[in-house]
Amino acid sequence: MGFLGPRLVAASLSLLIGLGLIAAEESRYAPLPLRLEILKPWEKARGRPPPGEIVAGIYERDWRRSDFQNKVAITIDDSLPNRYLAQALDILGRRGIKAVFFIIGSNFVDAEGKPMPRAKELLDRIVAEGHLIGSHSYWHRRMDEEPYRDRPGAIAAELDRNEALVDKILGYHYPILYFRPPNGAHSTPRYELDRALLKRGQYLADWTITSFDWNMRLKPGNPERLGPSKVIARTVKQAREESGGVVLLHCFPDTLAILERLLDALAGARNAKGVLEFSTLDEIMRLKYSP
Ligand SMILES: [Zn+2]
């Protein structure tokens, strides 16, 4: 596996760069990146990424090989700068839950590319209230298909665009740590996405618990449509059976309508190990990569 050598060198370099970044940003973001803390023991223990994984992060299958110790991290995708995002922040704030909001840049600008009226207010709230902003690409297109697949650099350019927009809206540089690919599609044939993340010192952040909240939006009569109770029951069942993990939710009106019930159900759920408890994506990463 000689080809892993340069990648590990690149990873080490980005870790050093990351350390500088952390120091520079420390005053503004107290609890941010854990790169070294997480990855050093991981590199020591494994020497290289597990099979099928070329960049550190969370993958859907992780629940099978990691013990997340009943800790549950909430992640929220596809927000728009609107009242639903505000409502998600209100609900999480009341419960003291810290989430990662995976932001799609094109959702935060108007047709002329200008930030939407509430874009700054809501991104500011995400940061001020102790959540993390993650990147979910600028256009929300699958990155293992055209127009990305055979165009080296297209993915990196889009990641740059998304991050630049977040910085522009906030008015300062925000160091993004986690990237969630649209549709969770991370392994392009030439691994362009993984390579781009590795170079940036960013982690891929898919989920391990699928809420299927998007199925509430399907038309009545569609056999795949799920009602609120089913969505809650399935999510809690999976979280219990898999001893925690990373929950995928969306900032859709249907999801916001059940968010409090869902969080209550998760918080009270128990399995042989005890009761599930809310944690953060950073903590899930630490649990996965601790030797
Ligand atoms: Zn999405």
Image (tube, rainbow, N blue to C red):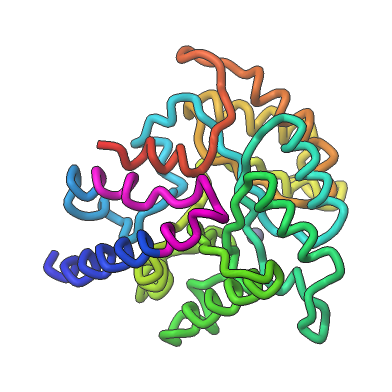
Given residues 41 and 151, the one toward you in this image is 41
In the image, the segment drawn in magenta is 21-42
Which quadrant: the N terminus?
bottom left
Quadrant, the C terminus = top left
Q: Residue at x 19, y 72 (%)?
A: 6
> Would residue 62 appear left or right of 205 to someone viewing this image?
left
In x, y percent, where is residue 233?
69, 28
Ligand 1 image-quadrant field: bottom right
Residue 139 vs residue 116: left or right? left
Q: Is residue 219 left or right of residue 224?
A: right
Q: Is residue 290 above or below residue 149?
A: above
Taking the image as drawn, is residue 190 in sight?
Answer: yes
For this view, does 248 lie left or right of residue 264?
left
What residue lies at 71% left-to-right and 71% top-to-bottom? 169
Residue 281 position in % (x across, y down): 51, 43
Q: Is residue 263 magenta?
A: no
**Residue toward you, 224 or 182:** 182
Which picture quadrant has residue 263?
A: top right
